[in-house]
Image (cartoon, helix red, strand yellow):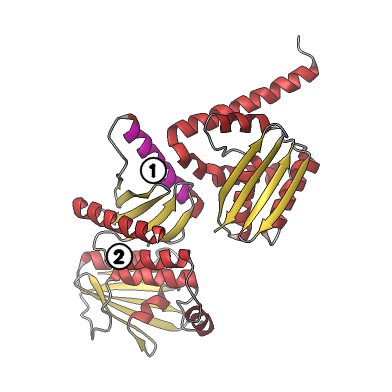
Amino acid sequence: MATEEEKKRNLARINAMIIYGLEKGLWDLLGESALAMSALIGRGMLEIMEKTMGLEIAGEEPQDILTEIGRIFIDEIGIATKFEITKVDNSVELHVENCVLHKVEDDLVHAGITPFMCPYLNIAAAAMRQRLQMKTRISKLDVDIANKKCALCFEMM
Amino acid sequence: MALKGNLKDMNLSDIVQMACKSRSQACLVVRSQDREANLFFADGQIVHAALDSQEGEEVIYELLTWEEGAFELEQDVPPPKHTVTTTWSGLILEGLRRIDEGTARPDQPEKRKEMQEMPAKKRSEQLADALSELLAGSSDIEGGALVGIDGLVLSANVPVGKLDETLVGAAAAAIFGLSRRSVEQLKRGDFSQTLIQGSRGNIIVTFVDERNVFVGLTPADINLGMAFVEARQVAEKLAAILKG
């Protein structure tokens, strides 16, 4: 019989397995076009966050929105320990540390799949479209497994 | 017999499309806030437009901004004069482009001046201009969009009212992804084009380059062979702009 701690870990593994399976299946079916679902997936996530969890994402600049998303994920949900934003010209870069989805993202990258189901990525893309009417494109997604760090870059179109 | 209604329920581009397709002589009267606009149709085109003291194509661009107004389409009314020469699809596309840019109404001169004084155009503006021009010159393709394989709509010019760009872009990218995967798995060479047929028209998805596709919209009753050729020509021109 598994302990409560083991059950929690197993639950996290099952969630990671579902994410991996979904992303791999969709990638096999659609190829790189699977990335087109990022903002749509984010739209659904944003809806749940705002309607069910009562967490509102607002801001007048991309970095305001991304900062708010980071704050919610770290302070309210606790799925990562650090979240930083750097704005350079027409792009905004997000640095996330110790994300609970880090391992599954790394597995996907190693399988040749660009992860497109990442809560920061999806919600940020959807929020920037819905709140700021701003289109974005992911220009970089680096996963550093050894240091448990992840970097995402949004290019403003 | 007259067709009556309100622009709240049926938008002007749909009425124009319907009147032009019937190819008969007709007059469309639209009344809103004590103003009356008249559009005259003959031989499948808009041939005359009048609003207050204004006549010609600018009237149509302004009329496209009206969201509300009672209309009446009366058949067999001959045009009193000819003040419009652009094709109906070209007028709609240009009108929608102006709405996007906020320059469709004559009461926005500052915006128009500002647009004219803008320096070098951004790539997105160049694409929008090119798409509008290419579609205006096409006889079979009435609207289209350039979509990235990540679902980003780089430019769109479609006569179907307001779009959910996120959904349309994702759907176009998914059609491209599925088509390319099918062609690849069934050993049909490289992906070139996909046709989707609906009861009111067709959607042609054409390869532009490794990162983008052109989504063309056509009416239902067209020569598909010609539409395929035109879609490929538009795609080649867009590819050249993207490369340049």
Image spot of residue A90 (x, y percent)? 61, 60
Q: The residue marked by circle 2 belongs to what chain?
A: B
In the rendering, at what x and y percent does residue B130 appear? 37, 66
Q: Where is mark 1, residue-wise?
A: B176
Q: Residues within 10 Å of mark 1 (few under 14, many from 20)?
A: many
Q: Between residues A151 and B151, which one lies in front from this camera angle? A: A151
Tell whether A5 sits left or right of A13: right
Q: Nearer the viewer, residue B123 or A45?
A: B123
Element at badge 2? helix
Quadrant containing the C terminus of chain A in the rendered view = bottom right
Residue range in magenta is: B168-184
Q: Residues within 10 Å of mark 2 (few under 14, many from 20)?
A: some
In the picture as drawn, the residue positioned furthest to the top comes out as A1
Q: Secondary structure at mark 1?
A: helix
Which residue corresponds to mark 2?
B17
Question: Quick one: label 2 or label 1, which is nearer the N terminus?
Answer: 2
Chain of the residue that carries numbered disc 1 in the rendered image: B
